Amino acid sequence: MLANTQGIENVHPHAAQDAKPVLSLNGISKSFPGVKALSEVALDLFPGQVTALVGENGAGKSTIVKVLTGIYQPDEGQISINGKPLSFPTAQDAGEAGVTAIHQETVLFDDLSVAENIFIGHAPKTRFGLIDRKEMVGKAQELLDRIGAQIDPGVLLKDLGIANKHLVAIARALSIDAQIVIMDEPTASLSHKEIEETYELVERLKAEGKAILFISHKFDEIFRIADRYTVFRDGQMVGAGKITEVSEPELVKMMVGRSVDQVYPRREADPGEEVLEVVGYCHPTEFEDIGFTLRKGEILGFYGLVGAGRSEVMQALFGVTKPSKGAIRIDDQIAVIRTPNEAISHGIVYVPEDRGKQGAIKGLPIFQNVSLPSLKTTSKNGFLRLAEEFKLARDYTQRLDLRAAALDQDIGELSGGNQQKVVIAKWLATQPRVIILDEPTKGIDIGSKAAVHEFMAELAAEGLAVIMVSSEIPEILGMSDRVIVMREGRIAAEFERDDLTPEQLVRTAAGLSEVTS
């Protein structure tokens, strides 16, 4: 059954004897420039059963969903449905083969009706080839009734609340008569009542014989509704079996089972005086009562699961969004930050997670990307001085070991890791006191990761105060002096580096109770 069994942990050989899988993946591999996202993974989904796919952020879960839904094509390996080998060159091919997905954020259209949203792209037609609106509305009503949604299929989507829009997205996914239903973090933005309704929907789909792949970070959900589990780590399948035959600690260990001792630069923490204090920071929808301190020469790690609110807090500190209340103190002085420009003037800079959209300006050369926030120092009497811009860019990109043909090369032509180096160089050129790095090594190759980690250690050693938001447990443990764990928009716990284990991190982030041995 398994394409690559070397190193597989906790696989139960009799787990699949009671049923044949409706879908099997064997030896699936997928690479992107500098990154191997999947390496010979295997996955089986069974009729009338829920298989939970578990793993850290970056373990390969999203990539496998995109392979299953025809967005990505695997480099190697085989997809089989009911024992028949298939390929999905397009998303439409995947749908026609009986695979559908309910995503955390599904694209819907506010100015279309509920029925039109459900059947967009595959609406029933009359014999003249026109959309049969009467049949479409009738079928939409059947689907809404089936999932217990009391929604008029003729109403415009923009007139519905968030919860009902989510139900429309579910009905849309089920409008394809699917054998296999993928639910990707389906409860991430739902209330407790809506989560219970989602569980009921899962039970109905199981009763209909659907094979369900359920992706969630919430262990209480996994152990409540899953029949089986599969664990991904670093793009590999490292464990699979029946949920009744595994414990929470075993699942956590499979997720995080790596040593970080030799991977990260050795550094002795010697923080200086306090640089930043955040008190009572709140936002109406994203986070509440956030408070912490940051010292000179310290790396403060922020960890949390999807939707924990970490990036939202950092964007508020940088003036991208406005908190509803709270205060910042920098060097014993209250600072009011309403815009990024004000944050920069106070010495706070932010390297965003999405460097492509928020960090780098594609179409501009490297040197202009670096000099953009520092034009006051590189220009004179309102005129740009190219020589000064080049010098500034050269000084800071050399420190980061940037690999590029020339400084006038378009930043869009660089690899992800080198784009990240340019974004970091841009902010360092402003000579900040606090640098916020949001997922600083996301999607970059191992060599570039090592360069960024080394440079982070150097920055701290030079006295810069660093906040690092990361979903990678080894990175959090290997780089942080202290770690703040967030859950559901609040600070759940704060740990000193020496007191922290991977298991503690996962348990705190997921809201699991401690297990005594």
Image (cartoon, rainbow, N blue to C red):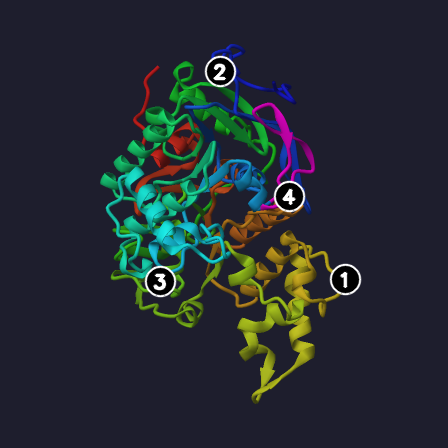
Residue density around tag 1, few if under 14, some if 14–19, many if 20 or more, within 10 Å: few
Give the labeled residue for mark 3.
330
Mark-to-mark CA distance, 2 and 4: 29 Å
Quick one: label 4, few (<14), some, or many (20+) residues within 10 Å? some
Residue at position x 64%, y 43% in the image? 89
Label 4 secondary element: loop
First in sequence: mark 4 vs mark 3:
4
In this view, the residue farthest toward the bottom is 381
Q: Secondary structure at mark 2?
A: loop
Percent coordinates x, y for residue 181 in the rendering:
45, 35
Residue type (three-letter) at the residue carrying disc 3:
Ile
First along the sequence among labels 1 and 3: 3
* The magenta segment: 72-90
> Disc 4 marks which amino acid?
Pro
Look at discs 4 and 3 and give the one toward the viewer.
4
> Which dot, 1 or 4, sits closer to the camera?
4
The Cα atoms of the two marked residues, 1 and 3, are separated by 40 Å
Picture coordinates of residue 485, whole percent (x, y): 36, 41
In the displayed structure image, the side of residue 479 where residue 77 appears, left or right: right
- Given this view, does label 1 or label 2 mark the residue nearer the observer? 2
Q: CA distance from mark 2 to mark 3?
A: 62 Å
The amino acid pointed to by label 2 is Ala
**Percent from the top left, x then y, of residue 305?**
40, 41
The amino acid type of the residue labelled 1 equals Ala
Please give the residue where the numbered disc 4 appears in the rendered image. Answer: 89
- Residue 496 in percent (x, y) is at 39, 37
Q: Residues within 10 Å of mark 2 (few under 14, many from 20)?
A: few
Closer to viewer: mark 1 or mark 3: 1
Q: Circle 2 is placed at which residue position?
A: 19
Q: Which residue matches tag 1?
A: 405
Q: Is residue 302 above or below residue 79?
A: below
